Amino acid sequence: MIETEAPVAEKQRVRWSRVALFYGLAFGWVCLLAAGLWATGNRNLAAGQGISLVTVVLAVAYMPAPLVAALVVERLDRRTPLIRDTFRHIGRTLPTLVAVAVPVVAALMAGMVGLSWLLGNRLDLNGVGRVLFTQEDLLANTLLLLPGMDADQVAGVSAGIPSLWPLLGITFVSALVAGFTINAVFAFGEEYGWRGWLADELRPLGPFRANVITGVLWGVWHAPLILMGLNYGGYARLGTAFMVAFCVPMSFLLWRAREVTGSVLAPAVLHGSVNAFAGVFLVVIVDPIPVIAAPAGLVGALVVAVVAALFWVSTRKWAGRVR
């Protein structure tokens, strides 16, 4: 009796040495990447400076780090990689992915805009920024973000900028399309590591502790590039703490999405969709402080926490489908 129970108990332990190896590989990759950017003179990744470079770095060289780290650890363990089963039942999983992604992305977007309006426009809290509604205001803010355009370019932008509600509708549809296609490809690089391998390894701790740990590790993983101005601009020294505050509730949301759908593709789609709609807040909010305002400041973190809690409660009967 004792001999048959011992392997089960062993199997339920978190292998912290493997967690350390996984994180060391993922974090070390980002440190090397940041060092390479610094050495080549690309030392300011703040919004508005080197946008094309930042996009390439995030998509091609930065986001795959957790995927590679997880594959290395899986190889060392001689385990069948999770990635082999990820796409096997995609036809059956797709309707559930859509059913999860559409309301969650809508809730995140609406929540961030609504809370920004309440706190910024109505209560006039410093740092939240103000939501712009009219086509004229949105155009003026867009032109400030894109200096140096000639008359033809300004005319093109003027014709393409609607008022707030059509713009949000277009952004919502575009975010879902990107989330299910190109953005999901790159977000999968992160999610395979965080909500895939690491989630499975930390599962014995229970969802609360596992997601707090994952969120902290995930947030700190961004630190080398945040210190160079990514996401939070001139608030680089504070940025990592606010990224952790954002990543912890987001980890709960993405973990639950995997549980409900049974696939790591679900957090990749949601992650990719959030990345896709985040840029609209540069246009629709004026005078924000990045560590406070949506999407990645305290306002965004609060909305993510509320959406995650509602999603967690409303999907109790569908949870536990992780394969």
Image (cartoon, grey):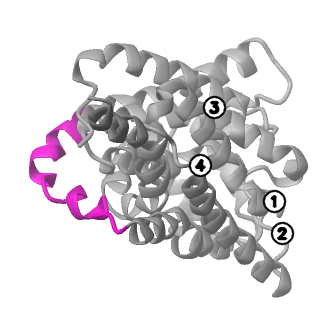
Badge 3 vs badge 1, beta-carbon distance below 8 Å: no
Q: Is residue 105 magenta?
A: no
**Around disc 2, counting alpha carbons within 10 Å, would you say few (fewer than 14), some (14 to 19), or many (20 or more)?**
many
Give the residue displayed 31% in from the left and 54% down from the top: 180
Q: Bounds of the magenta span?
A: 78-99
Kind of residue sitting beneath label 3: Gly
Residue farthest to the left, as pictured: 92
Q: Tell me residue 304's x, y (percent).
A: 55, 28
Residue 66 lies, with reference to residue 168, above or below; the image says below
Kind of residue sitting beneath label 1: Gly
Q: Which mark is residue 44?
A: 2
Where does label 4 land, which residue?
A: 16
Q: Nearer the viewer, residue 267 or 231?
A: 267
Label 4, label 1: how far apart the Cα atoms are: 32 Å
Where does label 3 land, which residue?
A: 300
Where does label 1 land, which residue?
A: 229
Q: Nearer the viewer, residue 50 or 84?
A: 84
Q: Is residue 158 left or right of residue 71?
A: right
Which of labels 4 and 2 is toward the front? 4
Label 3, label 1: how far apart the Cα atoms are: 19 Å
| Main secondary-structure element of the magenta-colored stretch | helix
